[in-house]
Image (cartoon, helix red, strand yellow):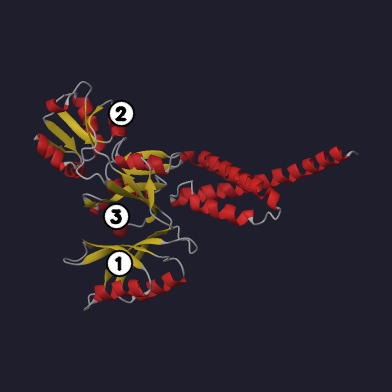
Amino acid sequence: MSKLDEARKMINEIDQQMANLFAARMKAVEMVAAHKKEHGLPILDTAREEEVIRKNAQYMQDEALKSYYVNFLKYNMSLSRSYQHRILEGMLVAYSGVPGAFADIAAKKIFPDGSSVPYKDFKAAYEAVVNGECDCAVLPIENSYQGDVSQVMDLAFFGSLYINGIYDMEIVQNLVGIEGAKVHEVKEVISHPQALGQCADYIRDHDFIIHESSNTAVAAKKVAEEGRKELAAIASAETAELYGLKVLDKSINASSINTTRFAVFSRFANRNPQRDNYFVMNFTVKNEAGGLGKAISAIGDAGFNLRALKSRPSKDLIWEYYFFAEGEGNISGEQGEKMLAELKKHCSNLKVVGAFEKEQKLER
């Protein structure tokens, strides 16, 4: 046997071993995809991929081959994502509104292989996940200009779902109308109350009569159905295109930094002691002097940074409130467990709604 034949024989044997290992690896990828579907997580996890490549590259001792091996790892990652995309095509993502709503746009960006399912309101979308109709829900929790979405905060407190990710999406509001309409012809404008609030200066400057709608996309749909030049909606460019409308005037919101934070709710928590660095929790404090101060001190004294603390009526007793808290730090680790144990001493109710690595930005 020549050296060439011997080399080819070795390659064939190695390829057979690699085929078996590849199949085993893809079985593990299936398990990863199932976990992501169950916990409402996106496919791409850049930090995890970089960590795996950095760690596995150390196994290659031959420096001449290391760069080739890194490329091999990256290609494997790409194949794994492609396979996960195929597996997650049937993922159902609930949102409030109709096709073209900002939540629909956010859902498609977070889960590009899933199917967005519209519901009439926040509660219906939330309960669709609770009862198993959908795998997760994408709901807004805060807008940088109009503030908190109190209905969703209440659902997080009173409901059973967990937040496994928060995503920031820039909101660009536009005046949209039927084909052939001009801005000077518009007399009435319709949109969601938050969108109307974001564009209050523009509306006042044009002396528009305003009408409220349950959703920006619902408003756009109504404009398309009525077909009147005098009626326009405030909505996204994507929504305008979806309903056959045109943008009459773009970026009409008062603040140039208009962002909505969307939370992904799922039935299962996804806490990771190695990677979590952001948390969301709800609590009520005991009715005693300095109760809230003691609770806040328990968080800060343990080394956690409390980024936001918001109060809402508990609805159980008059003048009793619960607190929606967001903070930085690994609440899933040993120090986090100690902090929660101390916090429970001062709280009548405590629920860790979610813990994850970081808040992420969605590109428009």
From the image, state whether disc 3 or disc 2 is nearer to you: 2
Q: Single out the mark in the foreground, 1 or 3.
A: 1
SS at badge 1:
strand
User: Which numbered disc covers residue 222?
Assistant: none
Establish if 314 lies above or below 361. below
Q: CA distance from mark 1 to mark 3?
A: 14 Å
Quadrant of the frame with the C terminus: top left
**Element carrying mark 3:** helix
Sooner in the amino-acid sequence: mark 1 or mark 3: 3
Name the residue located 85 percent from the left edge and 41 percent from the top edge. Answer: 6
Residue furthest bottom as drawn: 289
Q: Residues within 10 Å of mark 2 (few under 14, many from 20)?
A: some
> To which quarter of the image does residue 54 belong?
bottom right
- Dot 1 and dot 3 residues touching (CB under 8 Å): no
Residue designated by label 1: 283
Q: Earlier in the sequence, mark 2 or mark 1?
A: 2
Q: Is residue 287 above or below residue 91?
A: below
Q: Residue 335 at what x, y percent from top left?
A: 43, 72
Label ID, residue 155: 3
Which of the marked residues, 3 or 2, is nearer the chain's N terminus? 3
Residue at figure coordinates x 32%, y 42% from the top left: 103
Residue at 26% over, 71% down: 285
Closer to the camera in the image, 199 or 178: 199
User: Residue 113: x, y in percent?
Assistant: 46, 39
Q: Is residue 280 left or right of residue 65?
A: left
Residue 241, numbered label:
2
Q: Residues within 10 Å of mark 3 (few under 14, many from 20)?
A: some
Q: Quadrant of residue 311?
A: bottom left
Q: Distance between the Cα atoms at labels 3 and 2?
A: 32 Å
* Residue 244 placement (x, y as % from top left): 28, 25
Q: As rendered, which of 215 and 177 lies closer to the eye?
A: 177
